[in-house]
Amino acid sequence: MDFFLTEEQQLYRRQVMEFASREIVPRVRAHDLEGKFDLESFKKMADFGLLGLHFPEELGGGGSDVVTAVVASEALGEAGVDGGFTMSCGAHTYLCGDTILRHGTEAQKKRYIPRLASGEIVGCMGLTEPNAGSDVAALSTKAVKKGGAYVLNGSKMFITNGPIADVAVVYARTSPEPERHLGISAFIVEKGTKGFSPGPKLDKLGMRSSFTSALFFEDCEIPQENLLGVEGMGFLMAMETVEWDRSVFMAPFLGGMKDALDRCCRYGKERVQFGRPICEFQAVKHRIADIRIVIEAARALVYNIAWCKDQGRPVNHLEAAVTKLFVGDWGLKPSFDAIMVHGGYGYCHDYDVERIFRDNCLAPIGGGTSDIQKTIISKMF
């Protein structure tokens, strides 16, 4: 495995950080506190090419590899872009867009991918349900074939971009197979389709600039041509999508840790107590060292997954689970240490380390809880 970034990738990383610092970061604090989605920054991300970075050039994308996509996502977090915004962009590009790209017909790809890459439409993925979170195979949303259409009934929960999405990739049960993971299919559902409606925006602890809601389907008729991929293969498609959760989705958390580290180093040099900068005290040095240790380990794990995807090598369940667990659980300590280094100021909104901590609280929960990752890891022995 070669994690050495090319000169082009290093240059691109700097360009992404400069873009984010100039165009997005000045509004981050306000949108976080107000719980608003930054549509202006979303459009600018599209203009910069970040919403379709790995999409083929002929479909309006950048044609990049996965490692470069991780580089860009990490750079956004390091520049100070909040986790809510990067999560919304990730759900749009990878959970929705990439699923259509990989499993859609030529007509579906031509209809949606260019518009997703340009930011003309916003995408989401509907998988989790009120009674089917970690147990994905327990989903109960049904799609019954009726003539030349499917009729959807059911609901989804905790859907990133739910209230603002123009198009959704929705998973539903199409046949009652004995094995629960069989008989699940995916559909493309557009905003405005009769019987499809989002719930109200949820008010969350962190990721506040990312709009999250339930999705409801009541006798929602979907044309047969909106079936995505092969009927009954939806579960495997969803599991393939999870690989993005272990690489590009984890990268902003990784970048956020680096942002927290940089803030601690700056503050440690500026804050004077007992006649000297607090960075000279051993307790502060140790907290900063602990943050760096987690960053280095997390970076190796995240880039390993990205490298495997670029090599066309199936991502091992053990590797994926370890990466998700480590970034999720161990990533909380650096953000907490950052608050402690800043003391009382770290508890205030004016010093963004408290926002980094709140955003990071989702990492052990979303995309498969840490407890589920431990269960997966334990089965590998």
Image (cartoon, rainbow, N blue to C red):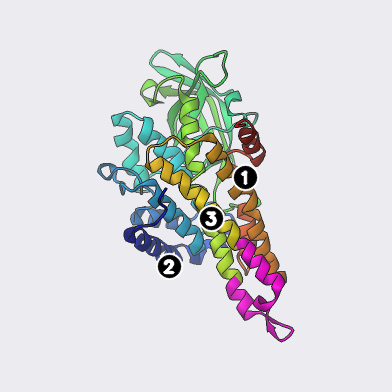
Query: Regarding mark 2 in the picture, which secondary structure is present there?
Result: helix
Which quadrant would the C terminus be assigned to in this image? top right
Is residue 123 visible in the rendered image? The answer is no
Residue tagged 1: 202
Does 276 lie within the magenta span? yes
Q: Residue at x 50, y 35 (%)?
A: 316
Above or below for 275 versus 53: below
Pointer 2 local density, CA inside 10 Å: few below 14, some 14–19, many at least 20: few
Give the side of residue 135 with respect to residue 227, left or right.
right
Q: Is residue 94 magenta?
A: no
Q: Nearer the viewer, mark 3 or mark 2?
A: 3
Which tag, 3 or 2, sits closer to the chain's start? Answer: 2
Looking at the rendered structure, the kind of residue marked 2 is Arg
Residue pushed farthest left? Answer: 58
Coordinates of residue 50 in the picture (x, y in percent): 38, 52
Left or right position of 18 against 326: left
Say which amino acid is labelled 3.
Answer: Leu
Residue matched to label 2: 22
Residue type at mark 1: give it: Leu
Q: Quadrant of residue 44?
A: bottom left
Q: Is residue 45 visible?
A: yes
Residue 41 percent location from the top left of the image? 44, 57
Residues 147 and 266: in front is 266
What separation in Å lies between label 1 and label 2 (alpha carbons)? 29 Å
Label 3: few (<14), some (14–19) or many (≥20) C-alpha neighbours in 10 Å: many
Circle 1 SS class = loop
- Residue span colored magenta: 265-291
Q: Which mark is residue 254?
A: 3
Q: Distance from label 3 to label 2 (Cα)?
A: 21 Å
Which marked residue is nearer to the observer: mark 3 or mark 1?
3
Frontmost residue, 199 versus 104: 104
Q: Is 213 placed left or right of 286 in the picture?
A: left
